[in-house]
Each structure stands twice: as structure tokens, then as C-alpha cells.
Image (cartoon, rainbow, N blue to C red):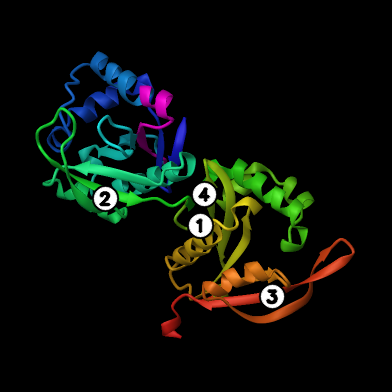
């Protein structure tokens, strides 16, 4: 079962067939030195470790340490996941890679994906990490993932103090193709409930194959479209897309599209979260200088949200969208990504 994925990695539940890989990983000198000697010396020991550890955690908590593999080859390179430990009030994140796959950004990539999945699918609002003070590499990973040092703790049954880091979680993440069914259902519902807010109709989009929705959420580094989602209790309740212009002379522009937040959650700050996520991502696209959007004329709440995030209206397109026998106008808005440079 795939838990989450990134552009390069897939994080999936372990099975007993992973015993040989686990045997090797847990006996790497780097694992024993930085984490612990788990006493796993045979394939049967590895199967027992899987049964009593990750597999039991999946059944009990819905999450646990998972297999990290390269999407390009399927090769297992490590493990990463969320753990509910005895003696710790919060869920913590754990990770370990084979030595030959270290220092390539994989640890940060899989930890961020696991954290996003935890916030969205398991409604976690705080995650901790415990690490030996002399494990500088692991501490750098945590800091790059947004963790802050809280203090020193001693785990039950241990005598050596270790450092505890913590990170506050947000209920939003970049969606991947695994989220396509949820995203499709959310958008079709929005098209039906608010036909004047979208140029697309239910009939147009309902006929499209699931692969079309998956492509919109491709995680390839060269993807020109991304979608961010907001979750509550594991349910996708909001989404927004961002697309970069593909034409050479317009490649400095990106467009925010398809903003939707279900009615019960519109005062929970999810709209702000989604808009900010698009702006943050737009800044990672080389050469992109501005973000554009349109909002239905008269939708004052949505226009106010965009204005709070620096968007300025520069015109109204009358009769922009036909909704049955009537027409609605669209307010065009824009904002520079780095206003001080303009």
C-alpha cells in the first residue's frame, strides 16, 4: 500500500517480503551508531521486527515506519514514517537510509512527504523527532524540514539523554496523483454547487479520464501545473491550482485557478493557507515574476481574500462566463511575487 510519494520517491507500507532489505538496513554500522542496535541478525529476526513494529503500528495507528523506494527503479533505499512511542506524548518521525543514498536530498524529501501525509490523513497538528546530539546530519535534515529544538529528553528504559525537536503542522499539502479521486470529486461538487465561479462545467470535466486529473498533479520537477489541497480529518475539503504559462514570451507569469473550499470550512483559514501555498511555490519557478487570477464579479469574500494576499484588481471582463441563460463578469487581479523589485 502506497502511503505517499514525491517526484523521486515512493513511501509504502512494509510487508514481510521486505525482510532481507530490513536485515541489511538495521545492521548498517551507520544505523547502529546513529539510531540503535535492534538485535536483528537473521531473516526471521527481520520478519519478527516487521510483524511487531511497522505492521503492528499500521493496524493499531494507521501509520508506522514505511519502505522508501526510488520511483524510477523500485529499489528500496531506506525507511521513513511516523511512530507512536511509549513514553512520548506526541507522534514522532523516524527515518534511515542506506549509506549509498545519503547526501542526495532523499531524507528531506521523504520526511516532508511523510509529515504532509500525517497532517492531512491523520489530522496531526504537532510532530516531534528525537535525535542524538552528535548526529549532525540528522539534525540538519530536521532543521530543513522546519523542526525546532525543544530540549532534552530521556526515553523510557534509556539512560542517555537525547535532543527533542518539534514542528507544528498545517492541514495542507501539494497533491500527488494518489489524490486524484478525491480531487476530482471535490471539483465536480464545486462545479455543480457554484456554476458561476468556474469556467468549466460538470459535464465537461466529468467525462475526462482519471489520468487527466492525475496529470494535473504530476510531481515531475518540470511540471507546469501543481495543485494544493487542504484537509480536515483526512478529508480533502479545499484545493487550488497554479499553472505557469508555457509560451516563451509569457513564461514570467503564473495563474492561480480552481480555488474551492467547502462551505463548513471557509472560516477556518484554509483559503489563506491555499493562496499562500501557491505564492510560495510560484517563487520556486525560475523566471516567474507575477501571479494572475480571475474572480467572479460580486464574490466579495473571495476578492477580499486575494486582496489580503497582495492581489490588485486591474479590470473587469463583462459577460465572461455564460451560466445558463445569464452571464457573469470576471474581475482580473494580479500581484508581483517580489513587490520591492518592481
Question: Which numbered disc, 3 or 4, marks the residue that appears first in the sequence?
Answer: 4
Disc 2 marks which residue? Answer: 142
Q: In the structure shown, which secondary structural element does the residue marked by tag 3 occupy?
A: strand
Question: Which numbered disc, 4 or 1, marks the residue that appears first in the sequence?
Answer: 4
State the residue at coordinates (47%, 50%). 171
Q: Does the magenta stretch include residue 129?
A: no
Residue 63 rendering spot, x and y as whole percentages: 40, 32
Q: Nearer the viewer, residue 228 or 10?
A: 228
Q: Name the mark on residue 113.
A: none
Residue 96 rendering spot, x and y as whole percentages: 25, 38
Q: Does residue 24 appear to the left or right of 216 in the view shown? A: left
Between tags 1 and 3, which lies in front? 3
Q: Which of 326 and 27 is in front in this view?
A: 326
Q: Name the mark on residue 175.
A: 4
Mark 2–mark 3 Cα distance, whole angstroms, equals 42 Å
Q: What stretch is highlighted in magenta?
A: 56-71
Mark 1–mark 2 Cα distance, whole angstroms, equals 27 Å
Residue sitting at the far bottom: 342
Disc 1 marks which residue? Answer: 223
Disc 3 marks which residue? Answer: 331
State the residue at coordinates (41%, 25%). 60
Q: In the rendered image of this protein, does residue 166 appear above or below residue 3? A: below
Amino acid at each position: 500500500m502506497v502511503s505517499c510519494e514525491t517526484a523521486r520517491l515512493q513511501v509504502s507500507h512494509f510487508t514481510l517480503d521486505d525482510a532481507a532489505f530490513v536485515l541489511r538496513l538495521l545492521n548498517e554500522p551507520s544505523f547502529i551508531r546513529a539510531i540503535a542496535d535492534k538485535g536483528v541478525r537473521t531473516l526471521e529476526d527481520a520478519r519478527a521486527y516487521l510483524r511487531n513494529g511497522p505492521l503492528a503500528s499500521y493496524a493499531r495507528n494507521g501509520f508506522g515506519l514505511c519502505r522508501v523506494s526510488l520511483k524510477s527503479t523500485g529499489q528500496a533505499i531506506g525507511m521513513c514514517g511516523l511512530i507512536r512511542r511509549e513514553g512520548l506524548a506526541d507522534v514522532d518521525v523516524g527515518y534511515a537510509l542506506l549509506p549509498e543514498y545519503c547526501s542526495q536530498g532523499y531524507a528531506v524529501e521523504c520526511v516532508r512527504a511523510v509529515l504532509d501525509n500525517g497532517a492531512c490523513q491523520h489530522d496531526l497538528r504537532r510532530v516531534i523527532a528525537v535525535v542524538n546530539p552528535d548526529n549532525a546530519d540528522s539534525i540538519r535534515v530536521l532543521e530543513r524540514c522546519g523542526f525546532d529544538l525543544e530540549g532534552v529528553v530521556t526515553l523510557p528504559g534509556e539512560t542517555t539523554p537525547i535532543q527533542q525537536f518539534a514542528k507544528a503542522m498545517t492541514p495542507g499539502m501539494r497533491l500527488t496523483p494518489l489524490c486524484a479521486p478525491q480531487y476530482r470529486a471535490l471539483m465536480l461538487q464545486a462545479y455543480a454547487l457554484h456554476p458561476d465561479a468556474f469556467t468549466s462545467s460538470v459535464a465537461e470535466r466529468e467525462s475526462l479520464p482519471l489520468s487527466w486529473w492525475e496529470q494535473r498533479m504530476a510531481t515531475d520537477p518540470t511540471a507546469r501545473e501543481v495543485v494544493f489541497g487542504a484537509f480536515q480529518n483526512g478529508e480533502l475539503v479545499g484545493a487550488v491550482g497554479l499553472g505557469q504559462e508555457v509560451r516563451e514570451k509569457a513564461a514570467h507569469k503564473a495563474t492561480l485557478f480552481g480555488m474551492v473550499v467547502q462551505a463548513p470550512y471557509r472560516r477556518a483559514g484554509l483559503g489563506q493557507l491555499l493562496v499562500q501555498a501557491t505564492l510560495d511555490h510560484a517563487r520556486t519557478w525560475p523566471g516567474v515574476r507575477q501571479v494572475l487570477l480571475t474572480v467572479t464579479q460580486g464574490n466579495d469574500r473571495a476578492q477580499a481574500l486575494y486582496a489580503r494576499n497582495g492581489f490588485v484588481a486591474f479590470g473587469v471582463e463583462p459577460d465572461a462566463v455564460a451560466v445558463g441563460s445569464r452571464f457573469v463578469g470576471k474581475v482580473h487581479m494580479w500581484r508581483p511575487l517580489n513587490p520591492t523589485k518592481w
